[in-house]
Amino acid sequence: MANSGKSPDFDAVVIGAGFAGLGMLRRLREELGMSVQVYETGDEVGGTWYWNRYPGARCDSESYIYCFSFSKELLQDWNWSGKYPEQPEILAYLNHVADRFDLRRNIQFNTRVTSARFLENANLWEVETDQGDRVTAQFLITAIGCISAGNVPDIKGLDSFQGEWYHTGSWPHDKVDFAGKRVAVIGTGSSGVQSIPVIAQQAGHLTVFQRTAQFTIPARHGTVDRKFLEEEVKPHYAEILEKAKWSAAGFPLDPSERSALEVTAEERLETYEAGWAKGGFGFVFGSYSDIRTDRRANDTVSEFIRSKIREMVKDPETAEKLLPTDHPFGSKRTLIDTDYFDTYNRENVELVDIRHSPIREITPKGIRTEDEEYEFDIIVFATGFDAMTGTFFKMDIRGRNDLSLKEKWSEGPKTYLGLQTAGFPNMFMITGPGSPSVLGNMPVCIEQHIEWIADFLQYMRERDIGAVEADADAEAAWVSHVNETAEPTMFMLANSWYLGANIPGKPRVFMPYAGGVGNYRKKCNEIADNGYEGFILDSGSRGKAASAT
Ligand code: NA7
């Protein structure tokens, strides 16, 4: 459909139908009365939880806090079964939300946005898709996820491999049969750590190719505690959510205020043991306040986890390879696992340290490292994503003066609050680089962006403002603040996807905002209360769509 007159085809185009896209669509349509078109590449809703169907895929946030908060009824009605929700259950939840709030009618599935161009004279975005759509909208809102562009490393010979291979982030919808097969998993990040124990139970033989040994904390997963849910969560959802909103990482946890260096070694050990027994992210937030900022404090927890690995893994040589010694705990994404280290005690599991013996090529039969050749029926790439910017760059997004986003961000992403980037008026990013989202509980972060963006659009409409754009100076100041905030943290001491270090040639820039979810919310609110300080408000052509649907 082309733009036929002065009015745009839609008030807003939203890209993506995961948590962010669904929530944004509902808010704009139901509360602002806007006409919205969502484009989604998949043939269903779900985003991350549509694509990541690998064995063992589940969320590291506890289920009762991994949800939308906009509907009290939804919060009360939905019953999770797992303490940590598994992928099929989260997908079922998102499908339920789509049905319950009648969201599908504004979503076009099987459609990838290929380009978006800002039409300066009209203050509109023109969006094109791979299905031949060409539409205009006043607002362009990206809800594309932060970890959605899969990274299959460029290893020589992959095309020649005669077996099957898969990337965890675009897993087939039909079950992959590992029974009796010789399987390789490359990568030991979240996806590897979750899938390895499950694949090991099914495969004939599993070989794990590890580049970096990981710190991981036991999840202590199980079925959901019904009594806890009915008595402690559901009657108090409002307070729980409020606490999560203002917390450091979007969880309703009470962070410890003690320093690890103030207490005796015995007391520390007791705290770490208690946290380890309880499992999950509480281990991090409930122990000591400085383990993520002070190297000496961090050493105590890093060493504690190493001692646990030595205890859990029976073969001393394997245990030694599994010890993370080149980065402190918490400098890469904190991992939560179920039986990860125990898996290496199985007869059918082998660990190959590719830091010391790198993969040279993939052969028709398997994988050749510097020292050996291995034969496989299936190779699983748990090798992560071109995070935070990769999905943006798959589209040709152009702002003022035909400037492409890829060119603007060639030295790393530059945003104001992670919500807008100068030169791209009326384009908003949900969980964009420069926001804390990937360091926190996603739905809490996503909903904050949805609410903030919707309030801004409402403000614009009430004042007849046609376009808003981040001011270049405000953006530069925010980029500096993001960098300064990350500088004293452990995050700077590892090669992680937060820094783009997993993608050859990607600029080494810390992309998320490490100042905390609650602090960030406060800053966003202050900026809004000050008349959207740092944004240029242009009262030119308003570009409202003809009718809301
Ligand atoms: P991650 O966390 O980026 O992990 C990818 C893993 O793959 C990690 O162990 C990498 O080693 C390894 N990797 C990456 N490239 C290669 C190559 N070329 N050769 C060998 N090994 C490689 O991705 P996940 O999918 O596990 O998790 C992504 C996020 O999803 C996660 O953080 C959660 O937020 C949810 P490295 O550590 O870089 O040496």
Image: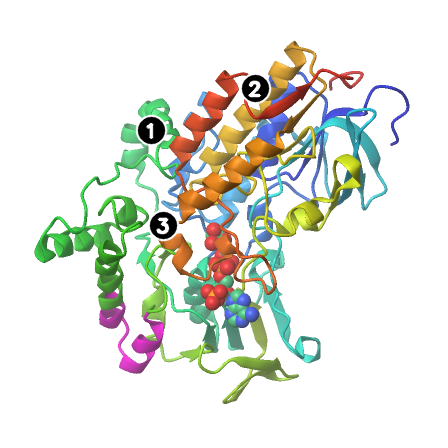
Picture coordinates of residue 432 (x, y %)?
Answer: 57, 40
Q: State yes or no: discs 2 and 3 in contact (Cβ < 8 Å).
A: no
Picture coordinates of residue 484 (x, y %)?
Answer: 43, 44
**Kind of residue sitting beneath label 1:** Lys
Q: Is mark 1 within 8 Å of ligand 1?
A: no
Q: Is 523 in front, or is 273? A: 523
Against 384, residue 255 (above or below) is above
Q: Which residue is under mark 1? A: 243
Q: Which residue is under mark 3? A: 489
Is residue 260 shown left or right of residue 360?
A: left
Instruction: Check the image and name the residue furthest to the front.
Output: 473
Tell me if residue 314 is in the magenta stretch. Answer: yes
Give the label on residue 95, or none.
Answer: none
Point out the tag, 1 or 3, that comes first from the N-terminus.
1
Label 2, label 1: how many angstroms apart (C-alpha)? 22 Å
Is residue 108 shown left or right of residue 25?
A: right
**Kind of residue sitting beneath label 3:** Thr
Q: Is 512 in front, or is 275? A: 512
Q: Residue at x 23, y 57 (%)?
A: 296
Q: Secondary structure at mark 3?
A: loop
Q: Is residue 33 visible?
A: yes
Q: Which residues are magenta?
A: 308-323
Picture coordinates of residue 481 (x, y %)?
Answer: 46, 39
Against 494, residue 511 (above or below) is above
| Quadrant in the picture for residue 119 | top right
Label 2, label 3: how many angstroms apart (C-alpha)? 33 Å
Against 471, residue 182 (above or below) is below
Give the label on residue 455, or none.
Answer: 2
